[in-house]
Amino acid sequence: MADVPYSPGLEGVIAAETSLSYLDVEHEQIVIRGYDLIELATKVDYVRVAYLLISGHLPDAEEYQSFTKQLTAFQAVPQQIYAVMEALGPSTHLMDSLRTALSALATFDSALDRKDEENTWRQSMTLLATMPAIVANSYHIKNHQPIITPDPALNYSSNFLKMITGRIPDDIESRAFDQLLTVYSEHEMPNSTFTAIVIASTLSDMYGALVGAVASLKGTLHGGANEAVMKMLLEMKTPGQVEPYLMNKLAQKERIMGFGHRVYMKKPDPRAVLMKESLKQLVAVKGHEDLYDMCVKGEELIHREKGLFPNLDYYAAPVYYLLDVPIDLYTPIFFAARTTGLVAHVREQYAHNRLFRPRVLYTGPRDLHP
């Protein structure tokens, strides 16, 4: 194995072939099944993008109607799942509640281990349809609030946001939230997706693959960054505090969450650019101009001092905040949005499977004897 190059964190290593997505950094484009993700986010809704990812093409009117009906039909969550979530400890992180709920949900699937396309489609529908209720009610359960059930009269994104806030969102709020779900839906091969396909390569079930992805996404170097960004913005309080706050962080060599990305090193994250505009539009309607100004000042300062661009989490966090989404739900919503990309990758892995079994560069001693 000495002639095989070692790349810490597998940086730059091609680990899989996929027809789902590609990060074309040079052209500042996120390719989703041949489409530009940012263009999709501005022209079609999240459900259409979900269909695209799972089926391979954008739905026509009949396919879209059928797909939305399936999602409505599968959206009920067994009461036993909520009972399991209610039994968890008071300090439970909502991502841990979600992880446990997914494990429990698998036990209700009578065809759990079937890998044919029809069954994995059904499982994909189950996961995509139930995720909003599971995520929203993880927060309500932890805070001893009543469970909110899905409203079949609302579209996917409006229903999701209503189950979080308890009120029907207006069109501007619903559109902003839908765009958030869309830009989080798929992103090539981040740690959580890699985790899911590694698990799937053993021919474990789809739920198990997503349980692993939840554990991965919880980490602050992955999905958990959005929570950290909002807490940082709240600590800064005013635009005038941005520079002293961030300069002190930099002097202490502390990591500034929401900046930098393993792939986007020299170019902006296109998703962050879109969410910056979404934040600007929300501020125009809801106020909080100071929040937008803080974000812009922070972006300018970190680029000046470190040459880094903001990633999606930096501008997604304040958008969540203006939509009245509790900070504890930021990462679970990220996972809910990414569910469609994850199930699409798992189905692709099943269809062209090869077990992942890498090797190591051994650095320990040799020839020891007891």
Image: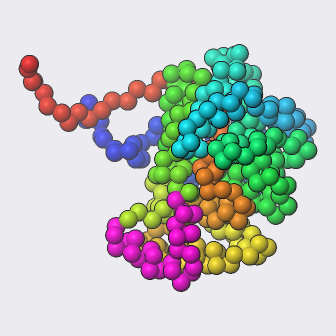
Compare residues 77 and 272 and report the one nearer the observer. Answer: 77
Does the magenta stretch mainly form a helix, a strand or a loop?
helix
- Residue 29's spot in the image, x, y percent? 61, 57
Q: Residue at x 30, y 41 (%)?
A: 6
In the rendered image, residue 221, in percent from the top left (x then y), is placed at 46, 52
Residue 325 position in % (x across, y down): 69, 57
Find residue 313 and report its image quarter. bottom right
> Residue 272: in sight, yes or no?
no
Placement of 126 over or under 59, stated as above or below? above
Please determine whether, in this image, residue 276 is positioned above or below residue 73.
below
Q: Pick whichever, 206 or 106, lies toward us.
A: 106
Residue 365 left/right relative to 126: left
Relative to 337, residue 347 above or below: above
Q: Residue at x 51, y 80 (%)?
A: 241
Q: Nearer the viewer, residue 356 or 367?
A: 367
Q: Quadrant of residue 39?
A: bottom right
Report x, y in % for residue 160.
77, 47
Tell me if I can see residue 331 in this picture. Answer: yes
The question of residue 241 being in magenta is answered with yes
Residues in magenta, as a range? 228-253
Q: Is residue 190 magenta?
A: no
Q: Is residue 268 left or right of 182 when viewed as pictured?
A: left
Quadrant showing the N terminus? top left
How many tags in the picture? Answer: 0
Which of 62/236 is in front? 236
Which residue is drawn at the image coordinates 75% and 22% (left, top)?
118
Residue plotted at (60% across, 38% down)? 97
